[in-house]
Image (tube, rainbow, N blue to C red):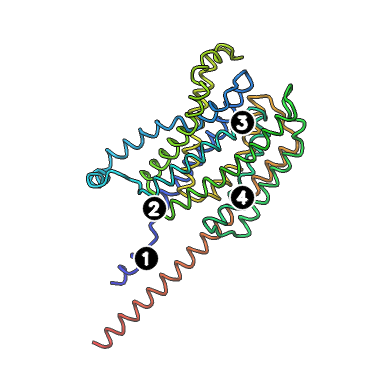
Amino acid sequence: MEPSATNNNKIPHNHNHNKTFLILLNCLLLAVGQVGGPILSRMYFLHGGTRKWLAAWSVNSGFPILLLPIAISHYSNTTTRRHNRNNPFVLTTWLFCSSAVVGILFGATNYFYSFGASYLPVSVNSLVSSSQLAFTALFAYLIVKQNFTHYSINAVVLMTFGSVILGAHMDGDIPEGETKTKYVLGFVMTIAAAAFHGFSITALEFAQRKSGVAVTFDVAMHVQFVVSLFATIFCTVPMVVNRDFEALSGEAAEFGLGETKYYLVVFGAVIALQVMVIGSLGLLLCSSSLFTGLVTSLLVPVQQVFAVIFLREGFNAEKGLALALCLWGFASHLYGGYKASLKKKKNHDYDVEDHGDDDEQGAKSSGDHA
């Protein structure tokens, strides 16, 4: 009977491996989308695009692609099909309503970001956006009572300081022909977007925890679908009012790179930004809002490199130093998580060993008594 007691205390390795795979997959999706999306959005504005609500709408409007994995999961999982005969809804009412509210917040965030992108170079826009890490850390502490170790605090400070260093030379990055007023306004709107984003992802984490619903593939996909749906609706209404959809053909005809490339840039931005949203929300649901903020900030210097390559933006020593600080900060957070996992495993082994000893003593006492 002793082996049974030991087996009951084993860690579910398959579950841990699946979670690690999902985290890595979502990190990859976030990286592809966060690097490609802003560059395509900036190309839109650089070559004659002027519709800020269109840029905001493009962030989440690719959400119908989520129907494919949702449908595949539904029809391939017999357990899900049996469950859905009695209850066709994967999300609880609380989680659905919370996701809808967060979607509206994301819609506002997208507009703030697109406003900033219309006036700021990708290098400046991304570094200002990385201030969301500080906002995420603040809201994570206030809303979800995130526990901070000195490793995570060190990561937040280093990665935020890297953004500050990048901001030191922003005057040299003002685009030619751009007024200082519009540049400052874009800067302020991007800061507001960072604050909204930090609050939104923390609020979604809080909603998921309070719902009591375990995070599965189906739940993650449905949450992302609802968030993106309501964010798209939020941006679609002002587009209809401003007749942005009717103006697209005229704007395409006057686009600096040509009409065909206009639609390629807009469509590419829609796909890339939706991939970014999928990766961001998926990472949030698989880990935490703080870790998602750290990964997002880590990708900021990567955006700088690609902006230099594709948009011919400058790359100076300050940006190189910011890259080093971001890498150092992220490594600090990973090392802290590694040490915490070792400590948890060590405590678990002690518990298993003590439990096994108790079982042996109990069996011996029973034998003596007999």
Closer to the eye: label 4 or 3: 3
Alpha-carbon span between mark 2 and mark 4: 25 Å
* 308 or 270, nearer to the observer: 270
Task: Give x and y (percent) for residue 206.
Answer: 48, 53
Which residue corresponds to mark 4?
A: 331
What amino acid type should be assigned to the residue bearing mark 3?
Phe
* 236 or 25, nearer to the observer: 236
Residue at 74% from the left image edge and 21% from the top image edge: 177
Task: Give x and y (percent) for residue 124.
Answer: 68, 34
Tag 1 or tag 2, which sits nearer the N-term? 1
Is 20 displayed left or right of 69 in the figure?
Answer: right
Tag 1 or tag 3, which sits nearer the N-term? 1
Which residue corresponds to mark 2?
A: 15
Residue at 28% from the left image edge and 87% from the top image edge: 368
Alpha-carbon span between mark 2 and mark 3: 42 Å
Residue at 44% from the left image edge and 37% from the top image edge: 230
Mark 4 neighbour class, 10 Å CA radius: few under 14, some 14 to 19, many 20 or more: some
Tell me if residue 41 comes above or below residue 143 in the rendering: above
Closer to the eye: label 2 or 3: 3
Numbered mark located on residue 115 in the image: 3
* 326 or 262, nearer to the observer: 262
Tag 4 or tag 2, which sits nearer the N-term? 2
Which residue corresponds to mark 1?
A: 9
Find out whether the residues at labels 2 and 3 contact each other: C-beta distance under 8 Å: no
Tag 3 or tag 2, which sits nearer the N-term? 2
The image quadrant where one finds the C terminus is bottom left
Task: Give x and y (percent) for residue 265.
Answer: 54, 21
Task: Give x and y (percent) for residue 195.
Answer: 60, 44
Alpha-carbon span between mark 4 and mark 1: 31 Å
The image quarter in which residue 52 lies: top right
